[in-house]
Image (cartoon, rainbow, N blue to C red):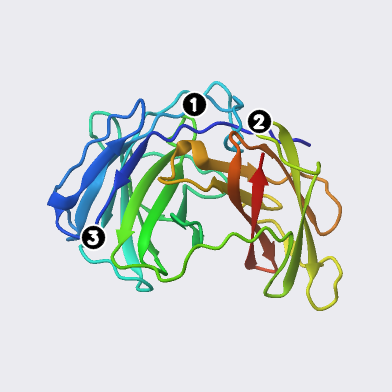
Amino acid sequence: MKRILTALAITSTLVITAGCASEVNSSQTPNSSATAVADANPHEGHNMGDSKTSGTEENSHSGHGGHSGNSKLAPANAIAKLTVPTKITELAPVNLAIDIKDKEGKPIANFDKFQEKLMHLIVVSDDLQSFNHIHPTYKGNGRFEVQANFPQPGGYTLFSDYKVAGKAEQVSTLQVKVPGTNPNPPKIDLATTKTFGNTKANLKLSQPSIKAGQEVHLIFNLLDAASNQPPKDLQNYLGEKGHLVILKQSSPLTEADYIHAHAMKDTPPGEIHFITSFPQPGKYKMWGQFNRNGKIITADFWVDVQ
């Protein structure tokens, strides 16, 4: 059964440096009212800024997203505030705190679970070489906390995906800068067959080439690397056969670059199918995530959209 792909408005990008609060800047996308802040906080870090998010009605289709929900839910217009330590170094675990507030600045206390979690956080380096999908713990009074790793110097964009109770699902974007220079230039590998640990993944398309704005089926054909047979230990991941995050190569990463799709049901063994569309021409990187006996396999592929 096809899953209707839903646009998610992501309305703010905050540029963050690991230094004093006076270095915090805010750049606003259209319809954004984000402001930089430098408040004290109980975690003794720096308050990295507000990100106002305005959701769209669920099940509207504009080539973005892949989230299911009630088409009549109204946007929450929440503001997400990210707090990080004053010093961030590569490879070292970093404590992140995300506070969700209403437009008056009051904490929002109640959230709905979706895909088995209250919040999904996608942490990706701006060169699209590093990807992590983690789940902050809700501490109450609108605060979520989690540890994240930043494996290389450079900029990172955080896509915080949450659902205020009774409102439409929303995504806030925040940015973190890890000091230093990354000596490894970004690589674009258009290979369609790769091996990830004990899993071989082959990416198939429903058409010879991908055209911007056209619906396309993306098929991940999974095989056990040892037996070359469909794995028998595939399990659901967050309530689905698989999840797919797609980002367009661009600088800076914005709301127009983010797509999240969910797997179709009733597909052949070892095959995970997604349906989506790519809004603009360019190169996109995709991360398909699947569950083999409790271990999450992340299969990444580049595609070129005409």
Q: Is residue 245 visible?
A: no
Mark pair 1, 2: CA separation: 19 Å
Question: Mark 2 highlights which residue?
Answer: 213
In the image, what residue occupies the spot 52% across and 42% down?
Answer: 258
Residue 162 occupies which quadrant of the picture?
top left
- For marks 3 and 1, the one nearer the N-term is 3
Horizontally, residue 136 falls left or right of residue 59, namely left
**Local crowd size for mark 1, using a 10 Å CA cut-off: few (<14), some (14–19), many (≥20):** many
Horizontally, residue 225 falls left or right of residue 285, namely right
Mark pair 3, 2: CA separation: 38 Å
In the image, what residue occupies the spot 28% across and 38% down?
Answer: 27
Question: Mark 1 highlights which residue?
Answer: 56
Q: Position of residue 65 (x, y in %)?
A: 58, 37
Q: Is residue 68 above or below residue 56?
A: below
Q: Is residue 111 visible?
A: yes
- Residue contact between numbered discs 1 and 2, judged by CB atoms under 8 Å: no
- For marks 1 and 2, the one nearer the N-term is 1
Element at badge 2?
A: loop
Residue 70 occupies which quadrant of the picture?
top right
Element at badge 3?
A: loop
Task: Determine which of the numbered discs, if any, sits on residue 137 in the image.
Answer: none
Task: Determine which of the numbered discs, if any, sits on residue 18 in the image.
Answer: 3
Q: Quadrant of the N terminus?
A: top right
Dot in front, 3 or 2: 2
